[in-house]
Structure formats: structure tokens, C-alpha cells
Image (spheres, helix red, strand yellow):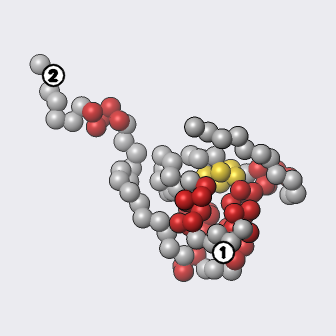
Amino acid sequence: MRRKRRVGQGRGKERETIVCRCEEVTLEEIERTIEQGYHSLEELKRLLRVGMGHCQGRGCLKIIAGIIQRKTGMPIAEQRFPTSRPPLKPVPLGLLGRSGLTDE
């Protein structure tokens, strides 16, 4: 279920930039959540669902860590990245469903 995104005011198109493509989370949403006091990748993941889509954060978590660094001063090297959960590489569900079955 997708929720509608509200376009932010302020810096224009930059704030409309989608950072997490899988979950359609914008730069504005991430910055606003950080400003509310949520400064870890795990907190942002739980609140905004970043890193929970098909790519499991391979496309966005490093970018979000950079945003946290810019907004809070916390170096990326000191941030804890959420644990990846299988499958680490997206697999078509049909392949899993046919596992072990033979055509007769």
C-alpha cells in the first residue's frame, strides 16, 4: 500500500528528490525525520521503511548515512548499518516455488 507524498516547500526540486526508490521516500521526509531527533539508520528504517524494499538498502542506505552526517555531524564510519536479511539478492518468486519439483 503506497501512501501519497506531499511535496515540500523550501529548496524546491531538491526537496522532492527521491532517495529510497523502492519505498519512494524523499529527501525532505528523511531530513524532517532527522530534525525530529531520529539520527540512526535503524530508526529511519523503522519509521520511513528506507532500505526495506526490493534492493534491501543497497541503493539508498549509504546516501542516507551521508545525509545523517551532513545534518548531525556523525561520521558515516561511526554509523551502524542495519543487518541485511535474506535474500541478499532479489530472486523471482517463481524460482523459489519450483525448487525441488520436476516436470513429469
Furthest toward the left, the residue is: 104
Residue 6 x/y as whole percent? 77, 45
Q: Is residue 62 visible?
A: no
Q: Nearer the viewer, residue 30 or 100?
A: 30
Decide if residue 88 is on the left or right side of residue 2.
Answer: left
Decide if residue 52 is on the left or right side of residue 14.
Answer: left
Secondary structure category for the residue under label 2: loop
Looking at the rendered structure, the kind of residue marked 2 is: Asp
Residue 16 x/y as whole percent? 77, 50
> Which residue bears the numbered disc 2?
103
Q: Is residue 79 above or below residue 62?
A: below
Q: Is the residue under label 2 in contact with that under label 1 (CB below 8 Å)?
A: no
Q: Indicate the quadrant containing the C terminus: top left, top right, bottom left or bottom right.
A: top left
Q: Which mark is residue 69?
A: 1
Q: Is residue 10 above or below residue 97?
A: below
Q: Indicate the quadrant containing the N terminus: top left, top right, bottom left or bottom right.
A: top right
Hey, which quadrant is residue 94 in on the image? top left
Residue 38 x/y as whole percent? 64, 69
Q: Is residue 76 visible?
A: yes
Furthest toward the top, the residue is: 104
Residue 66 x/y as whole percent? 64, 69
- Image point (56%, 46%), residue name: 22
- Image point (50%, 73%), residue name: 80
Sort mark 1 into few (<14), some (14-19) or many (20+) by Cα contacts within 10 Å. some
Hey, which quadrant is residue 79 in on the image? bottom right
Looking at the rendered structure, the kind of residue marked 1 is: Gln
- Image point (68%, 80%), residue name: 73
